Image (tube, rainbow, N blue to C red):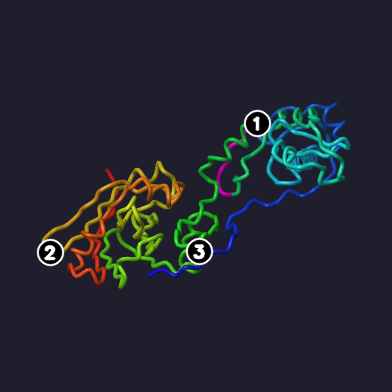
Amino acid sequence: MMATGGGACREVVETQPMKSANFDMAAATKRRPEKSSALVKYAGGRGSEKMDRRLNNDVHQLLECPVCRNSMLPPIFQCPNGHTLCASCNGAQENCPTCESELGDIRCLVLEKVAESLDLPCRYQSAGCHDIFPYYRKLKHEKHCRFRPYKCPYAGSECCVTGDIPALVNHLREDHKVDMHHGCTFNHRYVKSDPQQVENATWMLTVFNCHGNQFCLHFEAFPLGTTPVYMAFLRFMGEDDEAKLFSYCLEVGGHGRKLTWQGVPRSIRESHRKVRDSQDGLIIPRSIALYFSGGDGQELKLKVTGRIWKEQ
């Protein structure tokens, strides 16, 4: 049985916040920046590299919406006093959060032009992404960057911790008390005294260290339509293209009969619910599960065996 903990929301891996600074918008528009293969560059003499970093941080700070703290995409709006907001927040606010002036549909065309001139690194640069993008392409890239943090794969609580794989493995072990195993074969027994209780009953998550990677084995009970079922499936702690390099099989049985399943693990980029609802795993109807358990219907006793291997 699993502990339910882990409801606290925090981010294990996060980018460092930009330092706030002042920025002269008139000077920025008068002297348009030249694009480079790295950060935005401005022509200058002595001390130009230091100025490049300062101006880059200044502009990045200006492009952060003061309400939602997300980077602003066009259209960018401003109040009559020049304080900017993203389109979503401008539509949701009646007054400027900075000066309380009434908001309207005033576009900040200057800031939009400045944003279009920037080449910036991915926000997950410290995690390993070294690509450089024009500002608006950067925002789209970051939504799908393979170096962005993963969400906690534990499904037994509303846990919104994020981080890289080593941080999440430690989080699962320390905060959710998940069992950790080494090896590519397993033999688990699942016992429940009340097999009638299946509504949203998450039972167990086990993490396997296998082939130099980590895999999450889920086993749980839930209603599939009007039929109570038990389901076991595997998720890969990594990207989808890496997950497809592996296969796994699961088997459960009793009284000379057995059910088997073979498939490819799904990445934890896909939500637990999406994988479960796709029925991509070993599904055991309750009537069959009780038969495997002894047939008296008083207690559920299932033995699930499995193996993980890497495709050649």
Q: What residue is pinned by disc 1?
A: 134
Q: Which residues are magenta?
A: 127-136
Callout 3: helix, strand or loop?
helix
Side of 115 relative to 280 (left or right): right
Dot label at residue 223: none
Viewer-proximal residue among 56 and 22: 22
Callout 2: helix, strand or loop?
loop
Q: What residue is pinned by disc 2?
A: 255
Dot label at residue 171: 3
Is 286 drawn above or below residue 21 in the view shown? below
Side of 265 relative to 285 (left or right): right
Query: Which quarter of the rendered picture does the C terminus lie within?
Result: top left
Mark 1 vs mark 3: which is more N-terminal?
A: 1
Q: Which residue is located at x 21 percent, y 67 percent?
A: 293
Q: Which residue is located at x 46 percent, y 56 percent?
A: 153
Viewer-proximal residue among 293 and 109: 293
Query: Which quarter of the rendered picture does the N terminus lie within?
Result: bottom left
Crowd class of label 2 (few under 14; some 14 to 19; many from 20; radius 10 Å): few
